[in-house]
Amino acid sequence: MGFWTFAGFNKNKASKGKQFLIVGTKNKEADSVAWAAIRARCHYVNKKWLGGMLTNWSTTETRLHKFRDLRTEQKTGGLNRLPKRDAAMLKRQLSHLQKYLGGIKYMTGLPDIVIIVDQHEEYTALQECITLGIPTICLIDTNCDPDLADISIPANDDAISSIRLILNKLVFAICEGRSGYIRNP
């Protein structure tokens, strides 16, 4: 199966309104993952995969509600009316939630497809997807098992240029599919 087949798969799923989650937490790939996800209007995790993020969705959803509430409080100035100690504690909590859940803050349910940039590094995320039956697209290097992912893209997952190239193609396919979905609801 060629790379363009994977891009076509993404385009097809995006044209049906499916939700994507892009996961890549290595320092050098974090910015590329965030940029690609924002460009394609996808959710992303680029700092740290918190164990149980998908398999324990009810807890993650509770944290997301807390995050949204704290952001609303901060925007309306509600934190300034609290005592300094309480406000500082809530600001620290908001900063922590922004760091780890900022890319999925608008996620309302489990994603339909997960794109994993480094299968070896994101093994926990892959196992959660396998447990829940969520299709995965993984960039795999020589130290990875291609049988674990539903769709494997052989690539050097240590070179930022190869990650960007593949993410660009996948994002382009998702954007193209989404434009078809918007035109034909």
Image: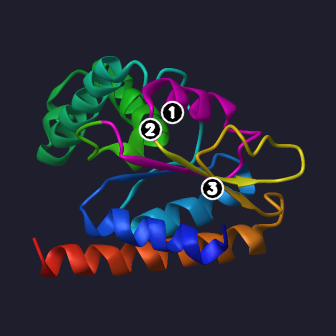
Measure the C-alpha gap from mark 1 to mark 2: 5 Å
The relative height of residue 129 versus residue 10 in the rendered view (above or below) is: above
Query: What is the x, y in percent for residue 154?
Result: 77, 61
The crowding category of the residue bearing disc 2, from other C-alpha atoms within 10 Å (few below 14, some 14 to 19, many at least 20), is some
Residue at (28% x, 73% y) in the render: 178
Q: Earlier in the sequence, mark 3 or mark 1?
A: 3
| Residues rendered magenta in the picture | 110-134
Residue under label 1: 129
Picture mark count: 3
- Residue 39 visible from this viewpoint: no
The numbered mark at residue 30 is 3
Measure the C-alpha gap from mark 3 to mark 1.
20 Å
Q: Residues within 10 Å of mark 1 (few under 14, many from 20)?
A: many
- What's the residue type where badge 2 is placed? Ile
**Tag 3: residue type?**
Ala
Residue 134's label in the rendered image is 2
Q: Residue at x 81, y 43 (%)?
A: 144
Q: Secondary structure at mark 2?
A: loop
User: Contact (CB < 8 A) between labels 3 and 1?
Assistant: no
Furthest toward the right, the residue is 142
Looking at the image, is 17 positioned above or below residue 109? below
Q: Position of residue 31 (x, y in %)?
A: 60, 62
Q: For residue 76: magenta?
A: no
> Which residue: 35% across, 62% down?
13
Is tag 1's residue or tag 2's residue first in the polypeptide sequence?
1
Could you tell me the amino acid type at mark 1?
A: Cys
Label 1 with label 2: CB-CB less than 8 Å? yes
